Image (tube, rainbow, N blue to C red):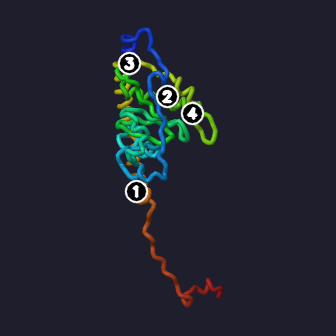
Amino acid sequence: MSRIDDLVKELCPDGVEYKPLATLFDTRNGYTPRKTDAEAWSGDEVPWFRMEDIRANGRILSDSMQRISKSAVKGGRLFAADSILVATSATIGEHALIRVPHLSNQRFTCLTLKDEYRNCFDIKFLYYYCFRLDEWCKKNTTVSSFQSVDMVGFKRFLFPIPPLAVQREIVGILDRFTQLEAELEAELEARRVQYAYYRDRLLTFDVKPVSSLSLSKRSPMAEGE
């Protein structure tokens, strides 16, 4: 942390500027093609992301489990590559960085950095900062037919704009922690498998055959004689 502290003192001694989400990002809502639109579901040109993709494949994604046809794209406009999908209804508190042009279902709001701010940010810094946005979303919901985020407050959520050198230093540290976490999870899973194997081996015994006596050979004492 001392490296980051030194950079902050050197590059922004008067503090870091913050701007609201709506100032920095264009926002679009995801959508689901009509199930009766056979043509929309017949093609596989467009990645179409759902919560299942995050659960199965993580938070930085380049392809989706399900794809749809170009004919399903409203106005012919895909969500841009390097946009961030934020869950704003139903399962709230999740987000993902999508590396390719794409669409998503209606549970997500897509954040695409405006052109005038593209040189101000490392996109992975924004991806990591969205973990704070996730926490805000979970605490600021409205309830109708299903839970959803307060979108007025959502668009006012503040993002810091530290110098790029600071952002990249933060990203480097968090990337290393993420890799370490993945390695530890893999090691833990391997240990679970190893534990289960030895538990089963240690608690499995050969069955000793037990001979049964015919009635004629039963003990007189057992028969009450």
**Toward the viewer: 176 or 48?**
48
In the image, residue 51 above or below residue 171? below
Residue neighbourhood size for the residue with mark 1, other residues' Cα within 10 Å, grouped as few (<14), some (14–19), many (≥20): few
Q: Secondary structure at mark 3?
A: helix
Query: Residue at 45% across / 71% down in the picture?
Result: 207
Q: Can the viewer see residue 8 in this picture?
A: yes
Residue neighbourhood size for the residue with mark 4, other residues' Cα within 10 Å, grouped as few (<14), some (14–19), many (≥20): many
The disc placed on residue 4 is 3
Whole-percent x, y for residue 167 in the image: 37, 22
Query: Residue at 42% across / 40% down in the picture?
Result: 103
Per the image, the residue denoted by label 2 is 132
Which of the two discs, 3 and 4, labels the residue nearer the N terminus? 3
The disc placed on residue 149 is 4
Q: CA distance from mark 3 to mark 4?
A: 33 Å
The disc placed on residue 219 is none
Q: CA distance from mark 4 to mark 2?
A: 14 Å
> Is label 3 or label 4 in front?
4
Report which quarter residue 11 is drawn in: top left
Whole-percent x, y for residue 81 in the image: 36, 34
